[in-house]
Image (cartoon, rainbow, N blue to C red):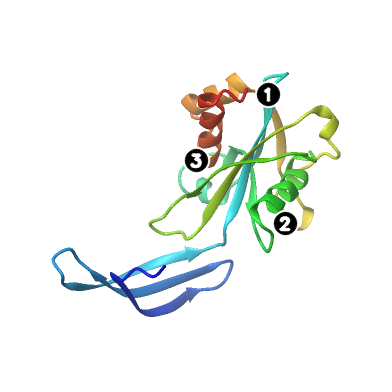
Amino acid sequence: MKNPKIEILKTEILSDNWYTLRKITYNYLKKDGHWETQSREAYDRGNGATILLYNKHSKTVILTQQFRLPTYVNGNETGMMIEACAGLLDKDNSEECIRRETEEETGYKISAVEKLFEVYMSPGSVTEIVYFFAAEYTKAMKINEGGGIQEEQENIEVLELDFDKAYGMIASGEIKDAKTIMLLQYAKINGLI
């Protein structure tokens, strides 16, 4: 699976505090046949999974809201973001991860999940692949209040929203999270709700 047009010359770790930031120097074979040395940074935070929980009968979706520091320091006045449930894979496969995260964040124990697709969310600087899922939920699946794990300091608020209202929050700017927008648009295009 190696690309013959790429030769990795050197990899340096710039930071290994929270996740790993590497500076990679490599040769790139251009179309004209000449090699060019380039250097880029790549942030490795692991891969993740996200899910849209939807209820066809009530025409609702479960989303979460929490404070996101990077958005706060980049113009989001409150730092609060409305998002689909998501988490890092850690050592799990993507389906095990999203089942665990759904229970931790939303309090719902889902029975069946459908993998939709997988995406590099920011391929110019971040190595992460996000696996996208959808699952139907019912009130009977709620086993706790959710909110995330205390030691992870997530402070998650669980939101049950009318699907049309949630979809409209894309246009109003209330939902600015890429994975959530993609999941809501997938649901709309494919008639999940």
Picture quadrant where residue 153 is located: bottom right
Under mark 3, the amino acid is: Ala
Q: Are marks 2 and 3 in contact (CB under 8 Å)?
A: no
Where residue 16 appears, as percent x and y from the top left, is 54, 73
- Could you say which is closer to the camera, residue 69 or residue 139? 139
Residue pictured at 47% horizontal, 77% vertical: 13
Q: CA distance from mark 2 to mark 3?
A: 23 Å
Under mark 2, the amino acid is: Glu
Against 148, residue 64 (above or below) is above
Residue pictured at 82% horizontal, 28% vertical: 139
Under mark 1, the amino acid is: Thr
Q: Earlier in the sequence, mark 1 or mark 2?
A: 1
- The residue that mark 2 highlights is 152
Where residue 99 appears, as percent x and y from the top left, is 73, 47
Instruction: Say what secondary structure mark 2 lies in.
Output: helix
Picture quadrant where residue 175 is located: top right
Q: CA distance from mark 1 to mark 2?
A: 28 Å
Against 160, residue 115 (above or below) is below
Q: Evaluate whether residue 68 shows in this view.
A: yes
Mark 3 Cα shell of 10 Å, populated few (<14), some (14-19), many (≥20): few
Q: CA distance from mark 3 to mark 1?
A: 20 Å
Where residue 129 appears, as percent x and y from the top left, is 52, 54
Instruction: Say what secondary structure mark 3 lies in.
Output: helix
Q: Earlier in the sequence, mark 2 or mark 3?
A: 2
In the picture, the disc for residue 60 is 1
- Could you say which is closer to the camera, residue 150 or residue 109? 109
Mark 1 Cα shell of 10 Å, populated few (<14), some (14-19), many (≥20): many
- The residue that mark 3 highlights is 178
